[in-house]
Amino acid sequence: MTIKNRPLAAYLFLLALISGGFIAGIRLIGVNGNYLAGFYMFGPAIAAAVTRLFFYRGGFRDARLGFGRLKDYLGFWGITLGIVCLSYLMFTVLGSISWDFSGDAFLARLKDQMAATGKDINDLPAGLNPRIMLYIFFLGGLSVFNIPTVLFGFGEEFGWRGLMFPRLCRRGLKFAFIVGGLIWFAWHIPLIFIMPAPGDFGPWQHAINMAILAAASIFSFVFFAFVYARSGTIWVASFAHAVMNNTSRSFSYFVRIEDQLTANLALAVTMALVVGILYLRKEFRIFDSFLAGDRDP
């Protein structure tokens, strides 16, 4: 069997090399390297593009790079925003967060970011102040017009859902969901250690936390795969991914994390509910027609 018949192996190998290079660079730079972590998100797209160029007989013919329908963008914007609202409701019910509408959480982040560039928090363009910046970032995160983060979403989706997911489906849909979700989770682990989330865990708590995050990754993987299959284009999946990240960040400006472990549990439960609703509504039927048209040439 030639490497042309093994695009998944080539993709994972290339991704490991690229991701390892990014992590090494971030660690080498030190604290300021954390601000380069966003580029880590382009690793899957780079690996997928190289795989399609050199190790996949189909090339880019089945990459689903068409823009798609405007109603899909608007529809999944609303759905994804609703999912984030549900997750924050779950955070609140479980006592994982406390609400603080002062915006101090955002202002502290802005201060740290500007200090890293040698500037003061008040060194803003004329007409702007930290409070106005808070409102701009909050409303901007909820909107549908945030192109840079859509590109970050594409950096992941073009690899995970656009290339890896259809290849894994050759062994069954459930296999693709579970194994794909676990691989996706494993790829995030280096970032957990480079930019650790709040929470002082003992060994057992850490193990439980990792298991919860793995489950949340699987359910999230299913949701984004559904968006990809339903819309028929990688750009809508990238958009939904960006919306989830943006809106989650926007709400985080007004909360304090009280318990990271239960927050992760709330997220896993939220995404499990989303997948359960899709299953009960028989939405997974879309994968039959989607995968039927996604065969190696």
Image: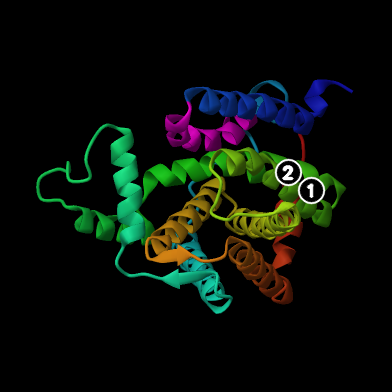
Q: Does residue 37 show up magenta in the picture? A: yes
To which residue does mark 2 refer? 183
Label 2 environment density (alpha carbons within 10 Å; few <14, some 14–19, many ≥20): some
**Which residue lies most toward the left here?**
126
Secondary structure predominantly adopted by residues drawn in magenta: helix
Quarter of the figure that contains the C terminus: top right
Residue sitting at x 78%, y 30%: 9
Q: Label 2 near label 1: C-beta < 8 Å?
A: yes
Using the image as rendered, state which of residue 23 and residue 248 is in the foreground.
23
Helix, strand or loop for disc 1: helix
Q: Does residue 259 show up magenta in the picture? A: no
* Real-space Cα separation, disc 1 to disc 2, in angstroms: 6 Å
To which residue does mark 1 refer? 179
- Three-letter amino acid code at the position of disc 2: Ile
Residue sitting at x 44%, y 64%: 256
Please report the bounds of the magenta region as a residue range: 30-49
